[in-house]
Image (cartoon, coloured by chain):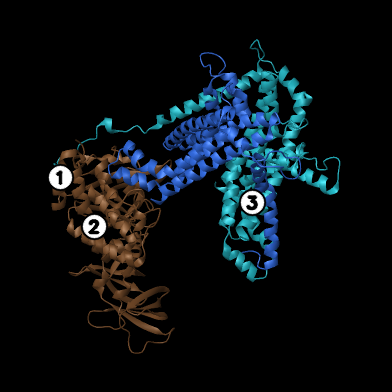
Chain colours: A brown, B blue, C cyan
Amino acid sequence: MSVPAFTGSNVMDVDAAKIRGAGSNVHFDKVSVAYGAHVVLHPLTLDIAPGEILAMIGPSGSGKTTALRAVAGFVRPASGRIRIGATDVTDLPPYERGLGMVVQNYALFPHMRVEDNVAFGLRAQGADKALIGERVKDSLATVGMSGFSKRYPRELSGGQQQRVAIARALAVRPRVLLLDEPLSALDAQIRRNMVEEIAKLHRDLPGLTILYVTHDQTEALTLADKIAIMRDGRVSSHGPTAELYRRPPNRFTAEFLGRANLLPVTVAEGAAGPKGLATAKLGDAVLAGVARGEKPGDKTLLCIRPQHLSLTGDEEHTNRIVGTLREVHWQGELTHLVLDVDGTPVRVSATRLPVSLPERGSAMPLFFTPGDTSLVPEDVRG
Amino acid sequence: MLVWSRPGRMLIWAVFALLFGVLFLAPLAVILLSSLAEQWNGVLPSGLTIEHYSNVVRGAAWNAVNASLITGFLASALALVSGTWAALALRVQDATLARVLGVLFFIPSAVPSVSVGLGLLVAFSHPPLLLNGTIAIVMVAHFVLISAFTFGNVSAGLARLSPDFEQVASSLGARPAYRLWHVTLPLLAPYLVAAFGLSFALSMGELGATVMVYPPGWVTLPVSIFSLTDRGDVFAGAALTMVLVAVTLVLLLGLERVAGRQTRS
Amino acid sequence: MAEAAVLPASPALRRVPGRFWIVPPAALLALLFFYPLVLIVQQAFLDDSGMANVAEFARVLHARFFLNALLNTITISVAATAGCLIVGLVLGLILAFVPFPGSGVIARLIDTFIALPTFLVTLAFTFLYGSAGMLNAGLMEVFSLRAPPVDFLYSTWGVVLAEVTVYSPFVLRPLLAAFSLVDRGQIEAASVLGARPFRIVRQVILPAAVPALIAGGSLCLLLTVNEFGIVLFIGAKGVITLPLLIYSKAIQESAYQVACIIAVINIALSLGLFGLYRFAAGRMGM
């Protein structure tokens, strides 16, 4: 029995274990994928801990979907091994891997009612009737679709179809849930709700390991415990979500996760003090930023998020730069300003504006806290 | 809407009515009329009768209806199985091989039907493969000629089927056979039904290969219509043609409804 | 579930993808279609003693009956295809861009003509345009003529007209598909800018229709070269095409080798046109 989660009578036991939080980890061991000479995934080594949500994000063609499909078993790695829990699944066909999968267009079987869609996986594995009935009920309840079991997919809205698709994946008690751009076919409003629903689902089923592929950084920031940012078939950066956002290890990550102002600076003095601050020069201004081991004279980037820039200074906002005001966009809750600082456009998201804003084209100071910054090396492409 | 002026539109519709009337409507109408004609020496028949139709239900004509229906059914069923099988099996081949085989499966539709008949006569007139003179050779001829159409229809259906359905089914634990039976084939059903209907219709009207190979005692409708008109019995021929048209249309429209219902549910 | 040791996947679990499933249908087709095809070619080039012999092939190639049939086949095919393109284009333009109540039903009705036997039209034409048909009877009555004035049916043109009727739906079908993709906004914008309908057809619609016309036209060429029923039913002495010649040599004269030689040429011609059609349809993305 190489795949215990899917072999007849002990489906129940595994089920109980899953719910209480003994999920499986996923391990990529130097997994590469190539179509002929064209490498779409360079050797990837990555671990998803049991019960963790890992979001893989990146532009299209970055290899994120390929990585997910390698776990699912739809693409065969050119090299490397993939393990799920204790099982090396590299050579297993998809139907023996014990997964659940949700895709962008839901792919609900149009000729089956909701309940038959949800029951599909268990029936395919030959589970007994009583268990199937119970699981279908549970799974539909988990996603709040209990009242819809007799409907056909075409009678449901996009959001409802996606819930059924999730219920169908959960009904087999997957060792890992694969979500492939699950929300990108939905409207913005429904998408926000669904992100929250998935977060809640994971609170209810903390043992469920989830690999979440998306190009949407908001979904990733909201849901993921860890994020892997993919670029050109490689992991550009990988780490805990908040950490990646606060201390992006490279320019690509800084710009892909949220909005970032990246000011080209020259390091003046290496890191000093308990906060690990270095000082750097931007023209004549001397700024302090959180360092990652730079040496004096290094050319690097100072990353500061638009919401951390303040229009007024105080004892905390000790960094000061001066820019020329170019654009002002009022958006209700926020006002977006664009300034020109030594030729670099700098965006500011301000919740409060001073009583009188300077004219466009006039000079304007900006203030920020050294602790909100980080020094980010320029990407070396190639 | 391309033409905005009313007289312009009227003129264009008149052109359409003329073309459609002369090319499509008049032939059907005149066949219907002649199948009911007693005698026809002037512009219109001199009298109407259903005698030609009542002859259809007995004797040689009735045998022809039977022969056509049985041939059409068996050949279409076999073509459906073989075409679906081929289209499904082609998906797991290498791209180059799949392309080559795909063209090969289409080629029977490109070869003149008379040559298909000739080839069967040349190939299967000697033991151990003696089919000449049997009913089977008619079935085989029809099967060869329509197999490309079922293959094409099913392939087109498969191409439109999102791979997501089958992949999700696999990831949920469905083995290939289970997946084929519970996911792929039901999703293909509209195309299968349409393919069957089209093959049946083509088989019903097949003439070129059939006149080459048919044995005595298995005269299909088109062959029977040809020998009737060749003898000068045009009204009986017209009546049989109407029967052929009616059966074909009933089959096509009926199966279309079935297919439509399946897509809707 | 113990996660301590990594269980290696046993080699038995390496699935061989179902590649061999292609063998049964491919073998069936090979036996029932390609094997006979090979025998036709073999018969065409071998004499009775089994020796390779191209003399008979050369003789048939130069025979008057063959050259006549070849010329007829090509003339009819080209003329009928041209007719199909014109009729298909006119019908398609009206159905797509000057629709009227019920035009959808009419389009489907024309489409079902594809499934009807081809000889039906010929039979109908005998009643309509034959020497004792409606048209001639009417003209003779009105103008008190002795002999039927209309006499095109038992000629090449009768066959061409019948084939135009039967095969123009094959042009209409891809055309309507192509027209449905033409941006209506573009046409409206052109109209607003003052373009006359002919200009819009020429500059906006026709360019979009060219691939469909090529695909439909090459399919018509192929089908008209292969057409048998229409020619057989018209039964005019002077109108013999290649398929009809194969039939009469094999069945009426039992001259199988001659029939095979003509079949080889006919098949080669058809496969060439099939290649053209595949190329055109591929370009259209069909």
Question: Which residue is at 48% across, 26% downward?
Answer: C28
**Chain letter belonging to callout 2:** A
- Indicate whether C172 appears above or below A242: above
> Which of the two discs, 2 and 1, labels the residue nearer the N terminus?
1
Identify residue for label 1: A12
Q: CA distance from mark 3 to mark 2?
A: 53 Å
Considering the numbered disc 3 on the image, is that residue within a helix, a strand or a loop?
helix
The foreground one among C122 and A65 is: C122
Residues at discs 2 and 1 both on one chain: yes
Residue type beneath disc 3: Val
User: What is the spatial separation of the Cα atoms under label 3 and label 1, in whole angstroms?
Assistant: 62 Å
Asked if badge 3 and badge 1 are on a common chain, one would say no
From the viewer's perspective, tell me whether residue C72 is left or right of residue A270. right
Parent chain of label 3 = C
Classify 10 Å Cα crowding around label 2: few (below 14), some (14-19), many (20 and above). some
The residue identified by callout 3 is C210
> Which numbered disc covers residue A146?
2
A360 above or below C282?
below
Q: Quadrant of residue C44?
A: top right
Q: Percent x, y for residue B107?
A: 56, 33
- In this orientation, which residue lies closer to the viewer: A381 or B264? B264
Residue type, label 2: Ser
